[in-house]
Structure formats: structure tokens, C-alpha cells
Image (cartoon, rainbow, N blue to C red):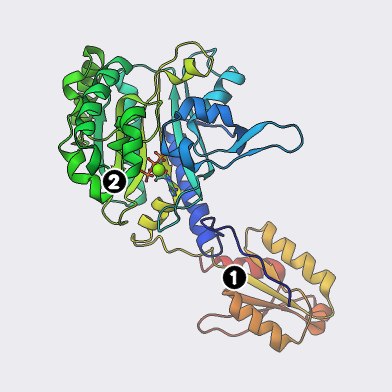
Amino acid sequence: MKESFQAIRGMNDITPPDSFRWARLERELRDWLDAYGYHEVRFPIVESTALFVRSIGTATDIVEKEMYSFVDGLNGEALTLRPEGTASCVRLALQQRLLYEGPRRLWYQGPMFRHERPQKGRYRQFHQCGIEALGFSGPDIDAELILMTARLWQRLGLSEVALQLNSIGSSAARARYRERLKSYFQRYFHDLDEDSQRRVSTNPLRILDSKNPGMAALIASAPQLAEDLDEDSRRHFDGLQDFLSAAGVRYTLNPRLVRGLDYYNATVFEWVTTRLGAQGTVCGGGRYDGLVEQLGGKPTPACGFAMGMERLLALLELVDGWNAEYPVLHAYVMNQNQVAWAVKVAEELRAAGLRTILHAGGGSFKSQFRRADASGARYAIILGDAEWEQQRIALKPLRGQGEQQSLLLEEVVTRIRMDE
Ligand code: ATP
Ligand code: MG
């Protein structure tokens, strides 16, 4: 026997009826994004490795150990499967000159790749929907993004997600804070796990983002950034909180929220749920005012966030009405010797807006009935020799009561529509 193939560990197939739930979520996201005037961009899955290294930062989980990087065997280029979308989105905006005529509200969605330890809610290929507002400096846009997400949870019927908020200040403020943190963690060096020991000197802020429960107590007592916060960031953060309070959005200030990527500054936020175990962050984002310039553009303030689609769908599994299936078929068209006629009838039903499967592969009417039943269709349409001679169509309800009727095509359409 030949060896069979398996998907790569941590990379999932999506099959019916889950594929329907994905498509439904994607539709809902589009409607929601349209409502706020955001425009979609699509960028490649593969980009140059340097783009991610420069934007995400070298001393981060993603760049240190999670990227699928490889050398293109044909021309020697160093390439990486995108681990996130912000860097690519900014690269696209610069390359395509999207910022020439002022600020832009953009979004993207699709697969991302990170070599993590696969577990529930954490995969090696996962999907994000991300939103980037490029060219806006005020806290009003931070508030817009957060209000948008709050609206989305409401539209989807999700109630158990809570907002955590922090400001990580300017880069100068973070530099001061980094020194204080470094000396704090150095004092407890031997209590740190291996990753954190390495980071004390390279990137002590990252330690705050550690997922290791053994580190929690030490992190909880670590110094906080608030006292190093610069005046501009403080004013911005106060402004944002005023907007949120006025809009009635509840939030928790979390001084240890730093986010795992280096490009963030000032506002950072996460939407977190307790319903998904350890992988409870469904959405994370913040300001990245330095990134556009860092990638070769003019200084351009910006703010954005990304949602994990797998985690959103896992939450939606707990919501009534989200276990939906593909739409029910109206008709299953059975045929024997009159295949050409059956093709024509099926096409006319579809043209009239009825979801229709045309039986393929021949066989007795008895076996075709079994297929019709299994398809879940509401009606079987039988096109045999007798029907062809009379140019009438036999219509049989497959669910509940009802006699088989002999009808003209227009009558079939009317009859099926009567159920709607
Ligand atoms: P986490 O702290 O859970 O590792 P992160 O801070 O690395 O998340 P971001 O880079 O901010 O995540 O990505 C935004 C969102 O994408 C996360 O909040 C999460 O919902 C989702 N996400 C990130 N990594 C994965 C993954 N490996 N599998 C599934 N979803 C993910
Ligand atoms: Mg991560």
C-alpha cells in the first residue's frame, strides 16, 4: 500500500460544514468593515525576510523562533511566509503610494504562519483579519478602532470578551523603562526561565509578555511604565479614555500589556475572553507611529489591530445560531434518458434563484431518490420518459407530507417559492 499524506502539523484543513461558518464570518466581517468605510488590500503570502525582521524586531518571539524563512533556490533571495499583516500592509501602502492623498483606512485577511507549538487556538497556519488606519495621529482613531471591535462583538452576538488597555509611551519613555525593568529582572535573574534570562539584556519588556505561568508572580511585581510615560503619550491616552467612557465602552487598564511586536508605541489593547482557555486573546493592536518611516516612508502616525479568526470561530461555536450549515437545497433533479432536458431544466431553476443539484452518474430512480434524500433538498424533480413525452415535470416533496404533482416549469418554480 502507498503511504498516504497528512497535512503539516499545526496547519488545518477546513471542511463542510465548518467551511460555511468561515464563509459566513468572512461575509459578516466585510459588511462590518463596509459600514466603517474601510477598504480591502491583498498582499502576497511571501515577502522578503528583512521586511519582518526590521518591523517586528529581532528580539521578539516571532523573529527569534517562529518565522518560516527560506532561501529561494532559484535566485538566493531570503524570503519568509508572512507571520502577520501590518508590515506587509505598510509595505504595500508605500509601494503603491496609497498615502499620497492623505490618510487611509485599510483592512486585509488571510493565512499567517508562525512556527509555534500547536495547541487549541494556536496553530502554525492561522488566519487573521487586520485593520490598519494609516496617517491618523489623534486618539479619536484609536477610539474608532476600539468602538468598531465592540460593535463587531455585538453584531456577532459575543458577550464574553473584555477590553484591556495600556499605553507603552514614546520610544524614549520605553528606553527609560527598559533600564528600570532590566535592573529589576537582573536582581531575580536566577528565578527567570531560559527565554527570559536571554531577554534581560536584549529586550526586558518582552519578559512581561511571557506565557510561562511560573513567571507570573515575578512579572506581577515588576515596575510599571506609568511613571516613565511621556507627556504626549499621557495626553493621548487620557483623550482615548475620555472617548471610550463617553461611548460607554468598558475597559481594564493593564500596565503589563506590552504586545509581542516591537513596532508598537503609545496605545496598546487586547480583547480577551476566559472562554477559550490559555489562548484567550481574540484581538490585539495598538499604535505604531514609527513604522511607516522605519520602512522608508515619510513619518506617518498609524494605528491598527488584528483578530484571530480561529479563536473568533471557537467563540462563535458557543453562540446560538452559529452552528449553521450550508443553505438548504430547493431541488434535486433526477433524470434517466433525458439528460439534455434535465440540464436545461436545472439551469432554468437556478436562473429563477432556486438552489438546485442535478443528479449525475445515472442509475435507477430508486437510487437517485436515496441521493436526493441525503442531499437535504426540499423537493425531488423527476424527469423520466413519461414526463418528456407530456412535457411536464414531476415534483415530489421530500420533507413532510405532500403528493407528487405533474406541473409545468413555471408552476414548479411558483410551487417551490410558496414555501419561502
Ligand atoms: P498570543 O499572545 O496569543 O501569542 P500574539 O500577541 O502573538 O498572540 P498577534 O501577533 O497580536 O498575537 O496577533 C493577533 C491575533 O492573532 C491574536 O490575538 C490571536 O487571536 C491571533 N493569533 C496569533 N497567533 C496565533 C496562532 N499561532 N494561532 C491562532 N491564532 C493566533
Ligand atoms: Mg504569539
Residue depicted at x 28% and y 50%: 273
Position of 242 compared to 130: left or right? left
Residue with the mark numbered 2 = 272
Toward the front, the furthest residue is: 190
Residue 125 percent across, percent down from the top left: 53, 50
237 horizontally vs 401: left or right: left
Q: In this view of the protein, which residue sits in the foreground, 361 or 224?
A: 224
**325 relative to 180, above or below:** below
Quadrant of the frame with the N terminus: bottom right
**Tag 1: amino acid:** Arg
Camera-side residue: 238 or 51?
51
Mark 2 Cα shell of 10 Å, populated few (<14), some (14-19), many (≥20): some
Residue 299 image position (x, y, % from top left): 45, 11
Residue displayed at 50% across by 50% down: 124
Q: Which residue is mark 1?
A: 415
Residue nearer the viewer, 146 or 176: 176
Report how many numbered discs are placed on residues in the image. Answer: 2
Task: Name the residue nearer the viewer: 223 or 414.
Answer: 223
Chain-order first, disc 2 or disc 1: 2
Q: Is residue 143 visible?
A: no
User: For the residue marked with disc 2, what is the amino acid?
Assistant: Val
Does residue 184 appear in this view?
A: yes
The quadrant of the picture showing ligand 1 is top left
